[in-house]
């Protein structure tokens, strides 16, 4: 689930990235306010509308449909372009509680955990967090160069999640493993690249790779 009024591009970028990365069937849940826009932009991914508030963001009435859709999924992505509201936290908590497949939590799916990180403790599924430095701070992490690794490791071990901490040197930290990705360039910091990364991760998880891999 992704997108909101003003952020209709996020689900499109993520879904197309998942498609190009080998995902077979892709279901894209978006707020009903942006459904016509997203459905027109996507050909192969199957777009479905979800209940939203007057500002075009998902609300709690979207939860039953999301939970129903999760039953047949091999992986789930939640967060790109969702916006911020108290209801987003309820949606994230419901998905983490009911999902049996791995969940990629990105962007506003992470932001809503600020002050509510204990929601991660309710997860019944493998969770992959993909924060940039600002989002990492909202999770209680410290992105300072000398503290990035230890802070990410503490987050991963405390909550049993995998953390992909984006940056000039991207860290991938699970409770058992550490990888450092030294590649990339400043052009990758442009808006939308995080949505593409999230879609790639979704496809790879759906093909059976473990979150850290």
Image (cartoon, rainbow, N blue to C red):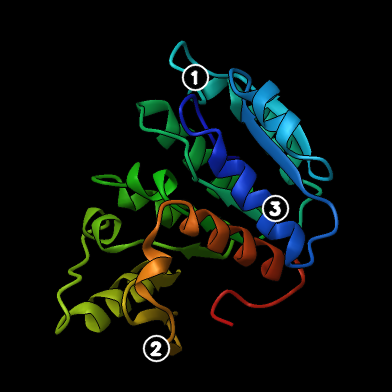
Residue 101 visible somewhere in the drawing: yes
Q: Can you give x and y, in whole percent of width and height, for residue 136 in the image? A: 28, 61
Frontmost residue, 50 versus 44: 44
**Is disc 1 in contact with disc 3, using a CB cutoff of under 8 Å?**
no
**Is disc 1 in contact with disc 2, using a CB cutoff of under 8 Å?**
no
As helix, strand or loop, the secondary structure at mark 1 comes to: loop
Residue at image mark 2: 182
Of circles 1 and 3, the one toward us is 3
Location of residue 139 with respect to 148 vertically, above or below = above
- Whichever of callouts 1 and 3 sits on the residue coming sooner in the sequence is 3
Q: Quadrant of residue 130?
A: bottom left
Residue extending furthest toward the front: 187
As helix, strand or loop, the secondary structure at mark 3 comes to: helix
Q: Can you give x and y, in whole percent of width and height, for residue 213 in the image? A: 59, 82
Q: Can you give x and y, in whole percent of width and height, for residue 68 in the image? A: 74, 36
Residue 75 visible somewhere in the drawing: no
- Whichever of callouts 3 and 2 sits on the residue coming sooner in the sequence is 3
CA gap, disc 3 to disc 2? 25 Å
Left or right, 55 with reference to 111: right
- Report the residue at 23% width, 75% height from top: 151
Of circles 1 and 2, the one toward us is 2
Frontmost residue, 101 versus 169: 169
As helix, strand or loop, the secondary structure at mark 2 comes to: loop
CA gap, disc 1 to disc 3? 22 Å
- Report the residue at 74% width, 29% height from top: 40
Residue at image mark 1: 56
Residue at image mark 3: 16
Location of residue 91 with respect to 195 vertically, above or below = above
Q: Can you give x and y, in whole percent of width and height, for residue 84 in the image? A: 36, 32
The 10 Å Cα crowd at callout 2, few under 14, some 14 to 19, many 20 or more, is: few
Location of residue 94 with respect to 154 vertically, above or below = above
């Amino acid at each position: 689930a992704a997108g909101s009024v003003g952020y209709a591009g996020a689900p499109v970028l993520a879904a197309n990235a998942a498609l190009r990365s080998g995902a077979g069937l892709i279901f894209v849940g978006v707020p009903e306010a942006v459904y016509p826009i997203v459905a027109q932009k996507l050909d192969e991914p199957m777009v479905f509308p979800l209940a939203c508030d007057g500002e075009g963001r998902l609300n709690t009435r979207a939860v039953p449909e999301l939970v129903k859709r999760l039953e047949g999924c091999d992986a789930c992505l939640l967060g790109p372009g969702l916006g911020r509201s108290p209801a987003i936290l309820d949606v994230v908590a419901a998905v983490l509680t009911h999902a049996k497949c791995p969940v990629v939590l990105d962007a506003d799916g992470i932001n809503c955990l600020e002050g509510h990180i204990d929601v991660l403790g309710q997860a019944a599924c493998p969770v992959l967090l993909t924060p940039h430095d600002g989002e990492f701070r909202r999770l209680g992490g410290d992105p300072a160069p000398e503290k990035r690794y230890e802070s990410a490791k503490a987050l991963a071990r405390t909550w049993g999640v995998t953390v992909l901490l984006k940056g000039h040197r991207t860290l991938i930290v699970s409770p058992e493993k550490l990888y450092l990705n030294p590649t990339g360039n400043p052009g990758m910091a442009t808006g939308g690249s995080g949505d593409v990364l999230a879609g790639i991760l979704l496809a790879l998880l759906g093909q059976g790779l473990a979150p850290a891999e």
